[in-house]
Image: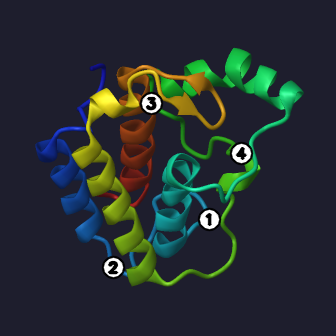
Amino acid sequence: MDLPNIFTKEVAEEVIGRIEKLTPVSQPLWGKMNAAQMFAHCCVAYEMVYTDKHAKPNFFMGFILKNFIKKAVVSDKPYSKNSKTAPAFLISDEKDFEAEKQRLVDYIRETQVLGAYIFDGKMSHSFGPLSDNEWNNMFYKHLDHHLKQFGV
């Protein structure tokens, strides 16, 4: 694994411990989202795995995502501050802090319990089949980026 392995209980619980340090009044070091919106934003990646809430990209957008965006998302290279995000990930309405935090924690734990082998070769909503390492990088990097955004 290129990044800490979110599929291990140790890493998943370390990330959850960082989440638990946040409060409804935690302020971001950059960006516009508050903590509750950030939790909801991070949940979108998991919603794309576990629900049918988000429409799949059309052929043209799928081509763009797979050929020009995928590498930046599944590599171990960190995201830059204030990088652009896909429309499905934009959260501008107010969210319930505790509900969104619990939803995110539940998704992290569910993913860890399922394990890397379930994700190896699993189809991504946007990028086609991904290896377990690519899934790990995508999940961990996104969570780490936003937890650092809030100083934890």
The first of marks 3 and 4 along the sequence is 3
* Amino acid type for the residue under numbered disc 3: Pro
The first of marks 2 and 1 along the sequence is 2
| SS at mark 1 in the image | loop
| SS at mark 2 in the image | loop
User: Quadrant of the image for the C terminus?
Assistant: bottom left
Name the residue: 45% across, 23% down: 77
| SS at mark 4 in the image | loop
- Observer able to see residue 76: no
Q: Is residue 103 above or below residue 75?
A: below
Name the residue: 33% across, 79% down: 23
* Amino acid type for the residue under numbered disc 2: Thr
**Location of residue 111 in the rendering, given as x and y in whole percent from the top left corner:** 33, 47
Q: CA distance from mark 3 to mark 4?
A: 17 Å
Q: Which residue is mark 2?
A: 23
In this rendering, the label closer to the viewer, 2 or 1: 2
In the displayed structure, does residue 8 sit left or right of residue 85? left
**In the depicted view, which residue is nearer to us: 106 or 148?**
106
In this rendering, the label closer to the viewer, 4 or 2: 4
Q: Which residue is mark 4?
A: 86
**Location of residue 145 in the rendering, given as x and y in whole percent from the top left corner:** 43, 45
Q: Which residue is mark 1?
A: 32
Q: Is residue 141 above or below residue 73?
A: below
The first of marks 2 and 3 along the sequence is 2
Q: Which residue is mark 3?
A: 78
* Amino acid type for the residue under numbered disc 4: Ala
Q: CA distance from mark 2 to mark 1?
A: 16 Å
Q: CA distance from mark 4 to mark 2?
A: 26 Å
| SS at mark 3 in the image | loop
Q: Is residue 24 above or below residue 54?
A: below
**Location of residue 98 in the rendering, given as x and y in whole percent from the top left corner:** 38, 82
The first of marks 1 and 3 along the sequence is 1
